[in-house]
Amino acid sequence: MSSPYSLEKERDAKQAQDMNIWKSMVPGRSSVNNIKNAEDFIAFLTAAVKDRSGPEMKNFYIYLQDCFTNADQDLDGLVGPREFDALVDEAAAAPRVFGFAPTAEQMYMNEEERFAARLQLFQAIDTAGKGVIGFPEFLAWAMEHIRSKTSRGAKKWQSGVGMLSLIQPTTAGEFVEFLKEATSSTSSPEHKDLYFHLLRCFSDADTSMSGVIDADGFDKLIDIAAMAPRKFGFAPSTEAMFKSEAERKASRAALFKTIDRDGGGTISFDEFLGWAMEHIKGKVTGGVKAEYQPMSIAEDASLAA
């Protein structure tokens, strides 16, 4: 197990790496590299998306073009899935320097998971299905992505429950709004954040690393997934819900059977995801209220694993 000291050194090293990537852009091409602090960075991005003819947009355009060019390894003016994987890290260097984005290591458990997630994003941008995208397609996606972030009030990224947790609200009201957005549209950034949060919850419960969980694993999964709503007072503690361990296991085993529709004795992530999304949607559309005592959650203990 890594010590907190070694983890801090790793984070510092990664931030230094991102700073080097960010500063290595072609000198003089864009003033983005001269931004000194987080507040100025957000002000710059806000101005860029607000006025497409302004100096901020011109500089941001050049910055994104430099990112794209650096990722275009074969110099054909296009990037494929593997180059796009590198492009995401290029473009994320600046927001990471100022604390507005997690590192890839904080978001994903391994390289395969990272590439699978970015391939899905690449395919969403590659609407023509050509297997490559040009700078105009990347620019359009990047501007819309930045617009959605700044319009919601960009906040510094914080470690949450689980390495993949991108659930960032700080109040009960923000948490409900986040869940409403996440369950109202599968194309929303909130839906993507919730998807990856639930994926990590499932992965943490899958101790056998088989890709499926049985009733006992589901019992653990419920407690892992309940940490976020309990943090904001939307769910009672296990002790308050059940009189005994036997009662808890029986109740959750019955719920497990409703999800395990084929009766195979195990469920996969897609089955859990479908149930969880419907469950959450039912709660937020029904006017859920924070009526329980908020619970303190240990900050991202999984990062020490």
Image: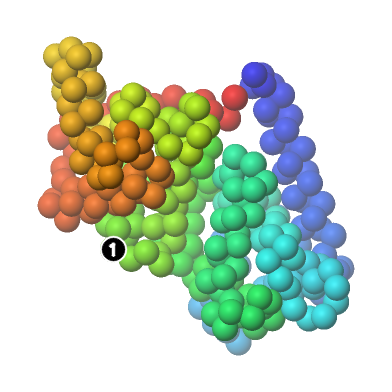
- In the rendered structure, the answer to whether residue 229 lies left or right of residue 63 reads left
Image quadrant where one finds the N terminus: top right
Crowd tier of the residue under label 1, counting other residues whose Cα lies within 10 Å: few below 14, some 14–19, many 20 or above: some
Q: Position of residue 216 (x, y in %)?
A: 33, 24
Amino acid marked by disc 1: Ser
Quarter where residue 28 is shown: bottom right
Say whether residue 68 is visible: yes
Quarter where residue 64 is shown: bottom right
Q: Is residue 298 above or below residue 63?
A: above
- What residue sits 31% from the left and 28% below the top? 215
**Number of marks in the image?**
1
Image quadrant where one finds the C terminus: top right
Looking at the rendered structure, the secondary structure element under dot 1 is helix
Quarter where residue 25 is shown: bottom right
Q: Position of residue 164 (x, y in %)?
A: 51, 42
- In the rendered structure, the answer to whether residue 79 lies left or right of residue 43 reads right
- What residue sits 43% from the left and 30% below the top? 205
Q: Is residue 17 above or below residue 72?
A: above
- What residue sits 74% from the left and 65% below the top? 83
Viewer-proximal residue among 156 and 11? 11
Outermost bottom residue: 53
- In the rendered structure, the answer to whether residue 285 lies left or right of residue 177 reads left
- In the rendered structure, the answer to whether residue 32 lies left or right of residue 291 reads right
Q: How is the image coloured?
A: rainbow
- What residue sits 27% from the left and 39% below the top? 263
Q: Position of residue 170 (x, y in %)?
A: 37, 42
Q: Position of residue 162 (x, y in %)?
A: 48, 35
What residue would you read off at disc 1? 184
Viewer-proximal residue among 154 and 256? 256
Say whether residue 173 is visible: no
